[in-house]
Image (tube, grey):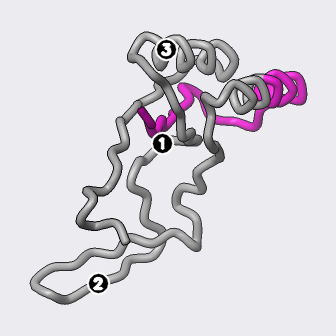
Amino acid sequence: MQFLALYTADSMGPPDAEHMKKMGALIDKQKKAGKLISTGGLKLRDKNGLRIRQKNGAATIENGGAAWAGATGWALLQAETREELVADVKEFLAVAGDGVSEVIEISDAPPEMKS
């Protein structure tokens, strides 16, 4: 099963070098174990962000959109069980620090939608 995890830190601010070293080691460990597919940061309210909405067949575009206000990072995770997923996210939070990680299961497209 694959999951999208969005992390929101309780306090904002740039991490120090020691924190970055610990996070890098955890990312490397989880990638090698096949648990972490990809990860990165979110540029909220960035000049390149967009919110595109369609209503009644017409699309409108707003600059600087942010779907998850406050979220600072994301990870695409692989886990066989809920227990494994919870353990992996707890390990991440132990390094990341106080905050919230919202986890959403990702489903594959139905066969009729695949080419």
Name the side, left or right, on which 96 lies relative to 24.
left
Tell me what residue is drawn at x 64 percent, y 47 percent: 41
Looking at marks 3 and 1 on the same chain, the residue that comes earlier in the sequence is marked by 1
Q: Nearer the viewer, residue 57 or 112?
A: 112
The answer to whether residue 20 is magenta is: yes
Q: Which residue is mark 1?
A: 70
The kind of secondary structure element at disc 2 is strand
> From the viewer's perspective, is residue 83 above or below residue 113?
above
Q: Which residue is mark 3?
A: 84
> Viewer-nearest of labels 3 and 1?
3
Q: Nearer the viewer, residue 72 or 81?
A: 81
Q: Position of residue 43 (x, y in %)?
A: 60, 56
Q: Crowdedness of circle 3 by 10 Å Cα count: few (<14), some, many (20+)?
A: few
Name the side, left or right, on which 113 lies relative to 49.
left
Amino acid type, callout 1: Gly
> Where, by quadrant of the figure, is residue 38 drawn?
top right
Label 3 to label 2: alpha-carbon separation: 41 Å
The kind of secondary structure element at disc 3 is helix
